[in-house]
Structure formats: C-alpha cells, structure tokens
Image: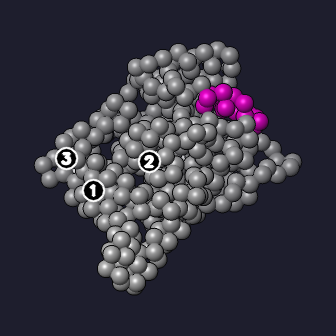
Amino acid sequence: MSEPAHPADNVAPAPVTVIVPARNEVPVLDYCLQGVRSQDHEPLRMIVVDDASTDATAELAQRHAHDDPRITVTSSGGPPPGWNGKTHAMHVGVQARGAGEPGEWLLFLDADTEPAPQLVTRLLATATELDADLVSTPGGPPPGASLVWWLLMPPGTQLICENAAPDGRSRKAFAIGHCILVRRAYFDKVGGWTPLAAVGNEDVALATAVRDAGGRTRTVRSVDTLTSHGMDPFGRGWVSFRKSFSVGTQGSVPLLTGAGVAHLAFGLTPPVALIAGSRSRQPWLVVAGLVAWGAQGLAHTRAAQAMGAPARSGPAAPVSWVLVGGLFLDAAHRVRRGAMQWKGRPLGTVGRGGGVRRQHRG
C-alpha cells in the first residue's frame, strides 16, 4: 500500500457525498459524524442511513442533522430478500442522494470509524495523483487497541492480499469497506450496489467491478487520517474476521475446516520443529524451525506495517496463525449449525453438505 497524497494547489474542489450505513452504532457513531463534520473539504454533504437499528442510532444521527444542515438522515427499514444489510443500507443512501452532479465522488464510510479533518482532502489528492477512480483505506488502530491488531490483523491482511491486490492488478482488486471513495461516474457505470446485492465481500467486489470497467483502483495507508474502532474489543474483532472468512469461502464447511487445520499446522510447525530438534539434538531441525519462524515473523511485520498495526508483533506470528486456524474452525462449526450471524441478522442458511445458500440478510 502507498501513502495518501497531499492536495495540489489551484484545483477546483470536487463535490463529495459521504454515506454512512449505521446499525446499532450508538457507542461509535458520534465519533464518526463529528469527524465527518470537521472535514476541511467543501462542498460536502452527508447521508446517514439508519439500518433498522434497535438502539438510539437514529436519534443520535438526527441530533447531528439538527446542528448541521449538510446531514440528511434516512432509514432503510432492513434489507429485502437477496440483499446484504450493509450493502442495502449503502444503496438506500445513494438513492436518497439522487442523480448527483458532474464530478461528484461518493465516500462510503463505516459508522465505527473516526476520520481526521484532512481525510477527504487527502483521498481526493491521492485519486488525482494516481489517476484513480476508487481509493480505499483501512485506517489505523485506536489508542489502547486490542490484541486483534497485534495477532489477527496481520495474517488477515496476508490472506486477503493473496487473492486481491492493493494496486488492482491481481485476479481481484483490493478494497477495505471501512472507507471507500469512488468516482460517481464509475459507480453508476458498474450499476451501483444492485449487482452486488448478495455479495458478502462487497468492498472487493466493487473495486473489482470498477477495475474491470476500465477504472483504476488503489488502497493506501492512512493511520494519520482514519481510526477504526470496529475491531475492538478482541471479541468484536474475532466475530468480524469469522464473518469475513465464512463469506470468503461461501460458507463451505469443508473449505473452512480444511483451512482451519492447515493454518493450525502452519502456525505450529516452527515451534514444534524447534522443540523437537532441541530434544533430539538435531541441529538441522532447529535451524529449520528458526528459519520458518523468521519467515513468518517477517511477513507478519510487513502486513502489520501496511495496516498500521504494531510491527513489533512479528515474533508472535506462529500464535497468530494458530488463532487464524481457530477462527476458520469456529466459522465452520457455526455455519454447520446455521448459527452464523452479523449484527443480529442471519448471515445465511446452511444445507446438509455445508455451504451458505444465498439468503443473506445482514
């Protein structure tokens, strides 16, 4: 991932519409909306979509709208059959915006993020410098971040990047759903969210669609411009990764189980080789264990740096991969039982042979 660019002088500012899908986000929504309202970019408008929340999310958003005329609050009432919840909420936000205007950009921003005042300006500058039509950024950890950022974020990033590239040149284009800025013309060109209604990894799917339609996509670091609260505490991060792994394998119990066993073995191999070599006094096995541990640690460190996670967590790489194995097995268990949920909605229904039938509601 590259660093976001700084704005150029004497460039007419583009209109930006920020769309924030929000379901039961009272603990974090205030941080998000305060950050959006403090942006140093104009013209800017905001649309908050209350996704059938059962808490006071709508009331909190309305208080911000009362204080800032740039904010519109609308409601999705929940997703219809064939739609994922977040994707439908973002679709409702675009519908509420209407046709837009020439040169407009759409910024899809998760409610559990906290943008710095320069976020929009920096993203637009990056798009201009790279001639990109979609720019995505993951954000960085909040102060006092949980161990998710140490142990799960680096291997999770490595797994995603195996199939999707930040520069858009792989089989799939990489994007992070926390924060996606897309040129409205290209968003409309690919059909908006409607063709992606039931796709689980809607961020990667949108970036890939834009790339395949002739656009350019990029994912950049943004530790200083966006904070992500969505992976904390540890339990919340675990559930988030579990959902992503389930969706990424299309709810296949055999795939989830196989991946779980493989990653457990991958994580355990270096320490087991080291211990076995020490006990049997076989130097070659000790060396093999140390080399494998070092290779895992180096890859872990690089991925951590890309996501703004603590780079010094590299030596814990084997523990991370064991945890990833546990995540896959946990996902397999829940999919098999038909108990996979996200934000209080079933993620899918499970047939006898495993696999999530496309009845996504969350």
Which residue carries the number 1 mark? Answer: 256
Which circle marks residue 202 in the picture? Answer: 2
> Residue placed at 56% from the left, 27% from the top?
29
Quadrant of the drawing holding the N terminus: bottom right
Alpha carbons under labels 2 and 1: distance apart: 20 Å
Q: Which residues are magenta?
A: 31-46
Quadrant of the drawing holding the C terminus: top left
Q: Earlier in the sequence, mark 2 or mark 1?
A: 2
> Residue placed at 70% from the left, 54% from the top?
4
Alpha carbons under labels 2 and 3: distance apart: 23 Å
Q: Tell me how the rendering is colored.
A: one colour
Which residue carries the number 3 mark? Answer: 336
Which circle marks residue 35 in the picture? Answer: none
CB contact under 8 Å: marks 2 and 3: no
Which residue is at the front of the view, 233 or 45? Answer: 233
> Residue placed at 63% from the left, 55% from the top?
220
Residue 303 shown left or right of residue 39 in the figure? left
Residue 34 shown left or right of residue 161 in the figure? right
CB contact under 8 Å: marks 3 and 1: no
Instruction: Look at label 2 and name its amino acid.
Output: Glu
Q: Is residue 1 visible?
A: yes
Q: Position of residue 330 (x, y in %)?
A: 28, 48
Instruction: Look at label 1 and name its amino acid.
Output: Leu
Q: Earlier in the sequence, mark 3 or mark 1?
A: 1
Mark 3 secondary-structure assignment:
helix
Q: Which residue, as the protein is rendered here, is positioned at the far right? A: 10
